[in-house]
Image (cartoon, helix red, strand yellow):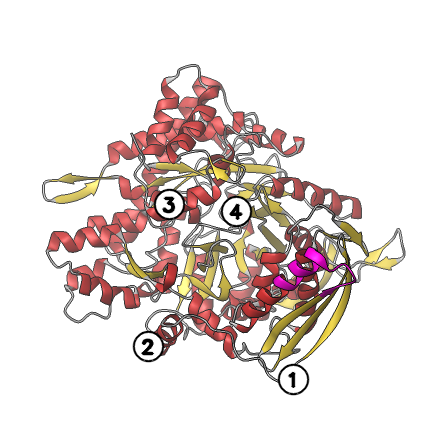
Amino acid sequence: MQVQLSENARIVLERRYLAKMDNEVVETPEDMLRRVAKNIAQFESDPVWEERFFEIMDNLEFLPNSPTLMNAGRELQQLSACFVLPIEDSMEGIFETLKNTALIQKSGGGTGFSFSRLRPSYDVVSTTGGVASGPVSFMKCYNAATDAIKQGGTRRGANMGILRVDHPDILQFIQCKADPKEITNFNISVAITEEFMEAVFADTTYQLVNPRTQQAAGELRAREVFELIVEMAWRNGEPGIVFLDRINRFNPTPHVGVIEATNPCGEQPLLPNESCNLGSINLAKMVRKEGDDWVVNWQRLGEVVEIAVRFLDNVIEVNRYPIDEIREMTYANRKIGLGVMGFADLLIRLGVPYNSEEGVELGRQIMKFIQETGHEASAKLAEERGLFPNYAGSIYEESGKPMRNATVTTIAPTGTISIIAGCSSGIEPLFALAFTRNVLDNDRLIEVNPQFEAILLERGIYSPELIEEVAKAGSVKHLEDFPEDLKRVLVTAYDVTPEWHIRMQAAFQEFTDNAVSKTVNFPREATKDDIRTVYELAYKLGCKGVTVYRAGSREGEVLTVGHQQEEQAQEARTSARPAPRKRPRVTRGETVRIKTGCGTLYVTINSDEQGICEVFTTIGKAGGCAGAFSEATARLASLSLRSGVEPTQVVKQLKGIRCPHPIWQGGQQVLSCPDAIAQVLDEYIKKNGVNGVKAADEPTANAAANASANSKFNGSAQRVIAGEACPECSGTMVQESGCATCLECGFSRCS
């Protein structure tokens, strides 16, 4: 049997998942699934399980998290996506954790931290007589380290930084990402306590606590702090919030420790030194025809849940853990996280609107079924294989319920694996019903959601002209002659009000052991009051955390649904090939001397009124090929810069290129002449701003045009990041549940 994959899915697999030799793909998608099934089934005595594992993946009914697909049965064999590490209040503890972070991120995992144990800034350091620099300074240190780590050639490092709301440095933490160029490898969330929320509603003060002394360190007015969180989230989507006391109320092993942090997307609360492996069931496949109607195939859903729980439990056994402490804690609690994807596709197939009581209730019923069936499967495994070691003292011992796993369910974002499965992401509404992709030579390819296409064909209203019209906005909301009953069902994320977003999240959270990754999307014109209302509603409805995003609030100019001027700007940009702007008669810049393995390289960077426009190089007296290659690199970089390419993208392309003679200069390794050019350009950008103009508050005309070119999806229901193209394929990057993900090749910084 050959797995049925879309063209997009095959591209994603070839770029990021399939085994390569000498940079050539030597594995088919079927080979990959067989490799994974065989590896995970090695813990079984009955060979039938390998076939069952292979079947649910081959049918695209279930897929494990990306590290399992990438690494199972290969040399790395690191299969977990989620890790939380402790940060102790000592220099030794801080940098021991940083070392362990590097090992985890090198192996493809994402890391979460609570910085709440660190003493506040300006607090005493008794060993030196100096003062502490505080949690935010060390978070910046971790961020810089993550920048230097490329995860196995396939995944960039991703982190979650959490600080308790009663930490004395909380105001600095809330505002630490006001500059979008700062702390770029972290999502941040404020750990909210019940005491704080009560003070917010009562409009009273609450106490700050010094974690070093556990003594009171002042007080703040809770509502003012809450308003600052709201304001920053309104500005750029961060920080998120996690309800820490609520998370610990559902901690299955309170006798082992207190949960302080989550994984990078917030859906997996974990104890210090704990890991978790995730997997998701494709609900789009869990339907069957009953007469003329489509219904949920509960029987098949139950079968897949049972197989998937066994699969994920096996992962714990065959996994290779980065450090011993993580292996020991993971074996002791045996947490797994089974979730879903394709929920929006399921609703459309059943004819149920996402933003309706019926939709929310169906979400609740499905997750209740998965939770109960998953727990039954874990109980059966406990009888077959034994209880998880920390069972004594857990919440399950009190009820007498045997369990193999301390947790069973998690709702993850599924950004990349949902592309592979060809379904909607997690429990999010659809991104778009149809959208236009620009391919080679400026050709346009319209991609259509398969459920949407099938419904149009069934109703006899499909036409290329209709698809073209839908692709302009991504939805059918604006079409006057479109059937009203279908308009109710065929909704995209910005057709769904924030209240319905949070109600759906709460419905799934009610029957999820861990937490739910979900983005509450707001239109551009949303107010701070709207953000505040959703935060309060999330608290009242029982969510464990919440992430919001207001269209247009990140990276300056963002193109979103339904703006005619933005459509015209995109069309103007994509109707012609990019051409370099004319070089002015006078430019200003600087020349930097840098040593390379080929000799001393002089790099000149010049800017005009629109930003960086050219790079020149001279390489000592070497001449020959070294000089020719350096000059060619500089000429092409200059052409790119004058054609509107972001300077940071030029840096990314050149940085890390290695020649046979790397050298060290000033404590930094210079790998080659192109790498040297990238280093000089990078320093110039940091000193003068991304456009080469100091203190530039607004994007240049070129940056805005570039953002327009990169926002290919009219009708975006997610965070389209202006000015940022995918570093792998130059495709559209979107922000979802805290992850930056490319919808075209699957590149992701955290999933």
**Mark pair 2, 1: CA separation:** 38 Å
Q: Secondary structure at mark 2?
A: helix
Crowding at mark 1 (Cα within 10 Å: few <14, some 14-19, many 20+): few
N-terminal label among 1 and 4: 4
**Mark pair 3, 2: CA separation:** 31 Å
Which residue type does callout 3 highlight? Ala
Image quarter in which the N terminus is found? top left
- Numbered mark located on residue 247 in the image: 4
**Mark pair 4, 2: CA separation:** 44 Å
Was residue 569 drawn as part of the magenta stretch in this picture? Answer: no
- Is residue 493 something one can see in this rendering? yes
Left or right of 437? Residue 299 is left
N-terminal label among 2 and 1: 2
Which residue type does callout 2 highlight? Gln
**Mark pair 1, 4: CA separation:** 60 Å
Image position, residue 368 (x, y; %): 34, 40
N-terminal label among 3 and 1: 3
Q: Nearer the viewer, mark 3 or mark 4?
A: 3
Q: Which residue is mark 2?
A: 564
N-terminal label among 4 and 2: 4
**Mark pair 3, 1: CA separation:** 48 Å
* Residue range (magenta): 618-632
N-terminal label among 3 and 4: 3
Q: Which residue is mark 3?
A: 9
Crowding at mark 2 (Cα within 10 Å: few <14, some 14-19, many 20+): few
